Image: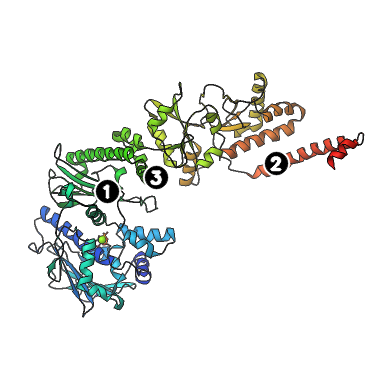
Amino acid sequence: MSTSTQPEKHTFQAEVQQLLDIVINSLYTDREIFVRELVSNASDALEKLRHIQLTEKEVFDDRLPLEINISTDDKANTITIQDFGVGMTHDEVVQNLGTIAHSGSKAFLQALKESGAKGENLIGQFGVGFYSAFMAARRVRVYTRSWRKEETGWCWTSEGAGSYELEAVEGQRRGCKIVVELKDDCREFAGADRVREILRRYSSFVQFPINLNGDKVNTVQALWLRNKKEITDEEYTEFYKFAANAYDEPRYRLHFSADAPIAINSLLFVPRDNPERLGFGRVDPGVALYCRKILIDHHPKGLLPEWLRFLKGVVDSEDLPLNISRESMQDSALVQKLNRLLTKRFLKFLEEEADKRPDGYAEFFDRFGFFLKEGAATDFTHREQLTKLLRFESNLTEAGQGTRLNDYISRMKDGQEEIYYLSGPSRDAIERGPYLEAFKARNLEVLYLYEPVDEFVMNNLHEFEGKKFASADQADLKLGDKPATAQGEALAEDETRDLCRWMRDVLGERVADVNPGERLVESPALVLNADKMMTPTMRRMMQAMNQEFDDAVKVNLEINPRHGLIRKIASLRRADEDLAKLVAEQIFDNALISAGLLEDPRGIVERVYRLLEAATEKGAAAAGNAAAPPPPSSAETGKEG
Ligand code: ADP
Ligand code: MG
């Protein structure tokens, strides 16, 4: 700790300065939210203090009331927000008010970088924490004194431009006092009426008394302990915004209480959008844990499974020991019980929603399905319930409509043993690919998987209701009956065998095997995965993660002995083997292209020129033959004219 009496000068971390520049120079709307951010910090500091009082003996200024005092001064043009919370030591000030520790601010910067959007549009979604004070401030002073006995007081001062000063101060009480010296065009925030209105809007659920110029403005209440029937939608929404520090409206809410096996009161929310999908990285668990209205942990790990990290809200259990430490929480048998109870209840809630309001559920699944998939793949305890909540499009659904796996099962054909799926970036891409036709011709349903995680889920689930999942581009599928629409004479069996052997020689290393297939209807050939695990999607994922990854794909070529081209190449092989080789290679490359597996297209152009040359030579020869003998009859010339 520093003992100097001269102010220390510090520069802001580069990211903070970047954030401050945006906050100061381009955020002119929604300026009022800085009040909410500062009050929310005060409330956090008081929650922490309350918890420390329960677990530590020695707390400085132990008698101070746990409350927030706000005062406005329209002559000095200031607003001051004071709390008797935990306060900060010298080093904590440097860490907290000079770098970006706050996940919201980080997310904000990230969103700004990625979307290229204006800060104004984003501030409404994130809030930027403490630094938002500079939306309205010329200068901010933070007087603070930690709860630790041996500490002293500090004053942090900044105008938001590049640096801040830190000076030791005497006689400071515990907590934080933030004096916001307002810009001229922000005088409104020095007016009591305006500030009262803001507090009503954003801070009515703060769990500590808030006084404005000496008058109490909120009624402290724990909404989750009240009777459901007496709570309005507006109250719930406001509570969500308060508890999740959110600016949107919740998509779902579940207010749930039980006495046995554990006393529990919980209020859970699903936000409108999934921040991870918007590209902000992994979110922290968002359901806070309380014991008899006292906050134990804002972001408790272990209270809910990882894959429920998108939930927001509050869980309160009287049965928890108040002094439970955050470190030991995950191991607590009680917390594990809470976890199971809450998870089961929430999944049941989703089942009900899916039944009663399928459209709303479809929208939820579109945004949050990722988490359920993660759960289905990794959480054995809840796998069954989760799998039933999954939705996939298929060749039998409309675009945008997902089917339940149970419904797929009920539509399965007699004797069908597997649940088929195909991966691809979109419905269109899958339907244009070569694999679906064999299934369509047999009236078999194929699920469409659009996201890399889907294939991961299938590999982990392995089966559903006793039916195995199987990728439709796998080499060893038995599809049963020949397709009804198979057209034309097929090549004789021994001739087909010969042709396959010859093609295997021609293609050499590039192919694992060449076989005749029953599945093809319209196409001459397709490639199939020889390696079950390393599917094209997996491979793309591996490549994205590791640039060096360049193992060749192991594919089988399956040819269609009924297709005209395949029948002709069998005879061309004897008449002009060089040309037949070119055709065989091109067929293989075309199949790779259809499967999205062609990695080096360089050979193709040259080969196609050679094929075109052969085709035009033959055409020219035919034309020459036709021209040389007897001149065209008058009837023919007539036709041409
Ligand atoms: P967040 O509240 O999400 O952590 P902020 O930018 O709002 O992010 O605040 C940054 C940090 O500064 C807080 O995490 C806290 O450690 C510290 N801080 C801010 N205000 C106070 C306060 N009134 N009392 C104690 N610490 C505070
Ligand atoms: Mg904050």
Q: Is residue 476 or residue 198 the one in the foreground?
A: 198
Lower position in the chain sequence, tag 2 or tag 1: 1
Q: Mark 2 points at which residue?
A: 608
Lower position in the chain sequence, tag 2 or tag 3: 3
Q: How crowded is mark 2: few (under 14 residues within 10 Å), some or many (20 or more)?
A: some
Q: Mark 1 points at which residue?
A: 269
Lower position in the chain sequence, tag 3 or tag 1: 1
Q: Position of residue 238 (x, y in %)?
A: 24, 56
Q: Amino acid under label 3?
A: Asp
Q: Amino acid under label 1?
A: Phe
Q: How crowded is mark 3: few (under 14 residues within 10 Å), some or many (20 or more)?
A: some
Q: Could you say whether the residue bearing mark 2 is in a helix, strand or loop?
A: helix
Q: In which quarter of the image is residue 521?
A: top right
Q: Could you say whether the residue bearing mark 1 is in a helix, strand or loop?
A: strand
Where is the N terminus found, in terms of image quarters?
bottom left
> Separation of disc 3 and disc 1 at Cα?
17 Å
> Separation of disc 2 and disc 3 at Cα?
43 Å
Q: Which residue is drawn at the image coordinates 36% and 68% (left, top)?
A: 27
| 488 sits to left or right of 256 | right
Q: Mark 3 points at which residue?
A: 366
Q: Quadrant of residue 352?
A: top left
